[in-house]
Amino acid sequence: MAMMGEMLNLGSMMGTLMLVYTVFKQFLPPHLQIYFEKYFNKIVRFLYPYVEITFDEYTGEFMKRNEAYSAIKTYLRDKSTASAKRLKANVVKDSQSVVLTMDYNEEVTDEFQGVKVWWSANKTLPSTQRIAWFPDDDEKRSYTLTVHKRHRDLITKSYISHVLKEGKAIATKIRQRKLYSNNPSENWHGFRKSKWSNVPFEHPATFDTLAMDANLKEEIKNDLIKFSTAKDYYTRIGKAWKRGYLLYGPPGTGKSSMIAAMANLLDYDVYDLELTAVKENAELRRLLLDTSSKSIVVIEDIDCSIDLTGQRDKKKTEKEGKDEEQSDPIMKKVREDEKKESKVTLSGLLNCIDGLWSSCGGERIIVFTTNYVEKLDPALIRRGRMDKHIELSYCCVDAFRVFAKNYLEIDSHSLFAEIETLLGETKMTPADVAENLMPKSDNDQVETCLKRLIEALKEAKKKAEDEARLMAEKEEEKQKQKSEKEGKEVKENGVVTAAEEVKENGVTNNH
Ligand SMILES: Nc1ncnc2c1ncn2[C@@H]1O[C@H](COP(=O)(O)OP(=O)(O)OP(=O)(O)O)[C@@H](O)[C@H]1O
Ligand SMILES: [Mg+2]
């Protein structure tokens, strides 16, 4: 408290000095003002025995979120609750608890190895006035740490790293995980450059609720856990701490559910990256740079999000386009507009995954999903980029048993054998199996649900058989038509040959 008083006295003294400085400077000719400023600063430095260190919320050319700022904010939470007079309340963790943080322009003190330090939260508006859609977006926030000069070494060498470590540890404990979606670049305005919007991530899927082959499930779980604990391993082998998963399979087989289960298993955030809303490769880079560690970046339906053959087609049509443009000014305008709307290219995506993405911090997972793996360019999914390829397919016996346990709370039943035989004979997606097993009313008994599934499986089997028969008939018809056509051609060729023979013979005879 005494130190606080000391600082306040110093503060008012410095304030008076600044006033004298501003008034006095006006009366000096411009060439002397420079000298005056230089010596005045020296006096101030001499009289003011404190060092100030500022941590901005956003830093660098790309306005990257400063991880130190977030860690300090979390670290100061507990300190502020005890000592700050003006606090801000935020609701976190499933909307159930309130977290208090110090308000702007408030100060709190902290002590480290017997040394007292002061923290203040600052908020400044930009010098240029403009209308902002979101009032907070234009504000520049920072924390300032003030400490006596003589403790400079202790503070810069030990205290700051202590604060960051503590802050990160608290953050992991209290963290409310988030689901982020990318904003169109038109909305990346203000200091905050809000590239991502977020909502609390509360998807209930876990690996226990995921219906799939038991061995494959175990393998994926182990792979994820191994990755999340392999920081030292990745450093040792000199590889960026990231891992790519490709999830493929028909619709309704649990690809999106698996991503949620992954995030819940590892306690990671999810960044749902909508590539079609990203205008160009540079935007993609900025978006990826703005993701935090301990996160899963997801690109769903990758085959629909990016023109995988775009580059090659573009090259082919470029020359044709140029000829066209020269003769038609309207076509020129159309082509210019097309160029402006150019989306992310395959090579841009590959570069991001390999290069910048790798260097923007560790502990990140990237997941692509697709219904059509065969459509993907091999370059996109080669090992090293997509390290693990996982096929999620039609419902198998293991998957059915998971559903039976979760939906009906049973491990066995006399109807299981029939269901399992039918599952081996027909293809039904886990989504359809789940839908049939789900009790439709309070009166629905276990047996009713199982019988409904049996009926649905039989129907699916019959439909598949009918379709197969129809296909076989069509194929047979096609073959028949083909051989009839060939026969006709042989016949026609034969006639022609005979005619030619006659003609040739005739000609020969005429000689
Ligand atoms: N393997 C599964 N385990 C548990 N539930 C599943 C599984 N597959 C599908 N479901 C259920 O079906 C619904 C649809 O599944 P999901 O969205 O995960 O499928 P998807 O493979 O992502 O489909 P799409 O290719 O259409 O995106 C989910 O709500 C989930 O309840
Ligand atoms: Mg999906």
Image: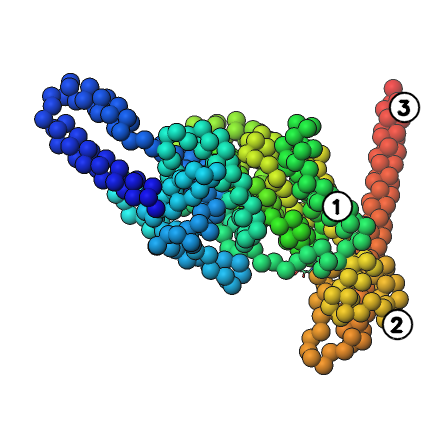
Q: Nearer the viewer, residue 430 or 36?
A: 36
Residue under the point 56% across and 45% down: 169
Q: Is mark 2 within 8 Å of ligand 1?
A: no
Of the residues under marks 2 and 1, which one precedes in the sequence?
Answer: 1
Q: Alpha carbon of mark 1 to alpha carbon of mark 3: how far?
A: 89 Å
x and y percentages locating residue 61 in the rendered image: 42, 32
Of the residues under marks 2 and 3, which one precedes in the sequence?
Answer: 2
Question: Which corner quadrant holds the C terminus?
Answer: top right
Q: Can residue 123 be seen in this view?
A: no
Residue under the point 44% across and 49% down: 79
Mark 1 or 3: the one toward you? 1
Residue under the point 44% across and 47% down: 76
Q: Which of 492 and 381 is in front in this view?
A: 381
What amino acid type is highlighted by mark number 1? Asn
Q: What numbered label is drawn on residue 509? A: 3
Q: Quadrant of residue 485?
A: top right
> In the drawing, does residue 156 fall left or right of residue 362?
left
Contact between marks 2 and 3 (CB within 8 A): the answer is no
Q: What numbered label is drawn on residue 222? A: 1
Q: Alpha carbon of mark 2 to alpha carbon of mark 1: how far?
A: 34 Å
List the residue tagged with mark 2: 414
What amino acid type is highlighted by mark number 3? Asn
Kind of element beneath mark 1: helix
What amino acid type is highlighted by mark number 2? Ser
x and y percentages locating residue 498 in the rendered image: 88, 33
x and y percentages locating residue 356 in the rendered image: 55, 31
